[in-house]
Amino acid sequence: MGKILVTGGTGFIGSHTCVALINAGYQVVIMDNLCNSKVEAVARIEMITGRHVRFYRTDMRDEEDMRQIFEDNKIDAVIHFAGLKAVGESVEKPLEYYENNISGTLSLLRVMREYHCNVIIFSSSATVYGCNNEAPYVEEMPTSATNPYGYTKVMIEQILRDVCTANPEFTAVALRYFNPIGAHPTALLGELPNGVPQNLIPYLTQTAIGIREKLSVFGDDYDTPDGSCIRDFINVVDLAKAHVIAIRRILEKTQKEKVEVFNIGTGRGVSVLELINGFEKATGVKLNYQIVGRRAGDIEKVWANPDFANQELGWKAVETLEDTLRSAWNWQLKLRERGIQ
């Protein structure tokens, strides 16, 4: 059905998407520099799917290494996850984010052009809606950002539009994720960042199991029912399935535009404090947390209007929040069984 290069394929979303692609009949080639993931994810993908996966440890900014991947494999399409991804860290390290995310994407696109690979699915983000739009977000809204991470997503979306305009053969889909959480139902794959987690759920589960002393909730004075930020939390397995549908759509040339954009979210806003309460209810584990000051770059209310993806792609989030939180906890418990902190 096609050979797909997955950049950042050992990461949280990338690894789950590799499983979904393989189960749908695609061949997968993974490229990752392992800056925020572990190579063991490749073996776990193989355990779940029963299929061998070719893996390259390299950085997408290294064009010679990228050329070798395309020399070794007839790549039909690319799903592009690779990139630094923490909002707070991007505010502290803007140069690193622009260098890695923008320069890396440009290198990838140059090599794709050289090898006549003209299909890409890009992992964009709800951060492209900035702070001037009101939730729920729809795809037609103007884009902006409040932090360097978000601006890299805005810029890459524009780069893809320009590349598609310049090259009649090139087509792209940008999937704007909201907040992916959870883990694979086998508990063989989940979110395991290197070092201190930057995302909410791995920090939450590490706090619940005793690795972290307490979880910080950034702000309780927002204009929301309980004062904490509102987000659209989507199960990572649901999210992965959207990539399979998008790949099929673009390879079968059933797109209606050369660049298509879809919100990938549940359409339901959940506050951080509501999420904590939901985790405690789903798992029976009490969480040690504290309210602290607001975090730079955070937006008050973020959730999707997913109607376009529901109708045009035939995709919909189906997993419940309770089951999703329970899957994240099961993943954390399995990590402890394996002696992984």
Image (cartoon, rainbow, N blue to C red):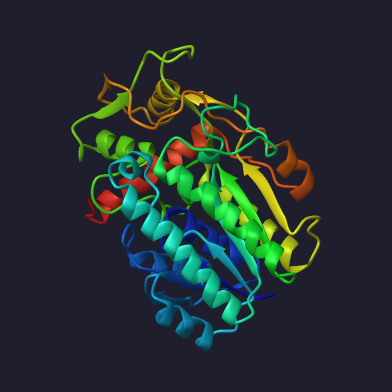
Left-right relation of 234 to 296: right
Is residue 238 at all visible to an observer of this figure? Answer: no
Q: Position of residue 142 (x, y in %)?
A: 63, 36
At a point 31% along the width and 61% down the height, the residue shown is: 35
Closer to us: 11 or 19: 11
Which quarter of the figure has residue 196? top left
Q: Position of residue 225 (x, y in %)?
A: 48, 11
Whether residue 203 is situated above or below residue 220 in the rendered picture:
below
Q: Position of residue 92 (x, y in %)?
A: 28, 42
Whether residue 50 is situated above or below residue 230 in the rendered picture:
below
At a point 38% along the width and 60% down the height, the residue shown is: 100
Q: Position of residue 74 (x, y in %)?
A: 60, 84
Left-right relation of 336 to 146: left
Left-right relation of 227 to 162: left
Is residue 90 at all visible to an observer of this figure? Answer: yes
- Please identify the residue farthest to the bottom as the structure is shown: 71
Whether residue 239 is situated above or below residue 39 in the rendered picture:
above
At a point 44% along the width and 37% down the height, the residue shown is: 326
Numbered circles on residues, count: 0
| The N terminus - image quarter | bottom right
Closer to us: 82 or 336: 82
